[in-house]
Amino acid sequence: MTPRRFLATLGPGVLWLVVFLVLPALIMLGYSLLTRTDLAQVGPPWTLESWGRVIGYDALFQEWTGDNLRVLWRSVWVAGISTALCVLMGYPLAFYIARQDARRRQLLLLLLIIPFWTNFLIRVYAWIILLRPFELVPSPMATLLGMVYAFLPFFVLPVYASVEKVNWSLSEAAQDLGATPARAFWSAVVPQTLPGLVAGVLLTFIPALGTFVVSDLLGGAKTALVGNLVQNQFGQAGDWPYGSALSFLLMGLVLLGLWVYARVAGRRGLEELV
């Protein structure tokens, strides 16, 4: 590919990634290596103190603490439970929508997307009003309900896209060979929806891991997640180096999830070619 053709085709995309992804990440990396002064300012000397705090080492008292690890584990746990609930509810829903006639299918997809027409913060406040008579706010249960409500469409839509492409004759062939309907579904249908399933899990787990609005409003201090910790460092605490280091931790988890998806999707594509 000639340089002119590269600039005309891939150039704008590469420029977009460099300006809005690479440069902000480098700036955030630089902040994570600086020091927060007594006046809530940021500047030299360069230090790894913030990174030590991320992994649980307090340089001031020279001791290891488990506070961040507990918050991180709580974040992974809450995001995992929310994702599991979305899978249990959204996987059958995707099949139900895909098996309807065209007019009813479009209506159901519209109902699934309609919540996106309303501001996310307004929808969270609506849950506060709904759950307050039952005295569920603030509580971990309210946080889970809010996350499942917020991220369920992100799971259903990619799974629905995979279900639409399912070759149901494979399931019929499996049953003709003696497999039970459940066995035929698990062996012939589920593997065909695996790319959409993995994409839906990632699109649910990643934002649930980094959210702070839902846990802050519906969970309060009882369900403080790593997203709340990051938001607090850039807001009230004014500790930008520590917040930047925590953000890099979240970014690492996101990249790990994307790597898993690339491996699964790549293996699936190779199997289809074979």
Image (cartoon, grey):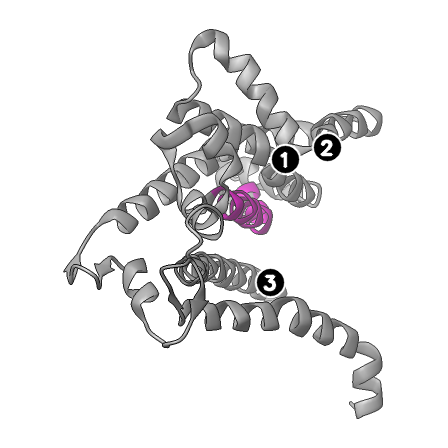
Q: Dot 3: within a 10 Å radius of its alpha carbon, few (fewer than 14), some, or many (20 or more) residues?
A: few
Q: Is mark 1 on a helix, strand or loop?
A: helix
Q: In which quarter of the image is residue 150?
A: top right
In the rendered structure, the answer to whether residue 7 lies left or right of residue 136 reads right
Q: Nearer the viewer, mark 2 or mark 3?
A: 2
Residue 211 position within the rendered picture, expressed as x and y whole percent measured from the top left: 50, 42
Mark 2 to mark 3 CA distance (whole Å):
29 Å
Q: What element carries label 3?
A: helix
Q: Residue at coordinates 49% horizontally, 29% vertically from top-left? A: 217
- Whether pointer 2 and pointer 1 mark residues with C-beta atoms closer than 8 Å, the reply is yes
Classify mark 2: helix, strand or loop. Answer: helix
Task: Write the residue at 41% across / 49% down.
Answer: 237
- Rate crowding at label 1 as few (under 14), some (14 to 19) or many (20 or more) other CA atoms within 10 Å: many
* Tag 1 near tag 3, CB within 8 Å: no
Label 1 amino acid?
Answer: Pro
What is the quadrant of the N terminus in the image? bottom right
Label of residue 269 in the image: 3
* Residue 122: x %, y % from top left: 65, 27
Q: Mark 1 points at which residue?
A: 153
User: Residue 169 falls in which quadrant of the image?
Assistant: top right
What amino acid does circle 2 point to? Ile
Which image quadrant is residue 20 in? bottom right
Taking depth in this image into account, of 232 and 136 the one nearest to the observer is 232
Q: What residue type is labelled 3?
A: Gly
Residue closer to the observer: 195 or 47: 47
For marks 1 and 3 on the same chain, the one whose residue lies earlier in the sequence: 1
> Which residues make up the magenta segment?
189-208
Name the residue carrying label 2.
Answer: 113
Please state which of residues 266 and 259 is positioned toward the viewer in this rendering.
259
The relative height of residue 36 versus residue 220 in the rendered view (above or below) is below
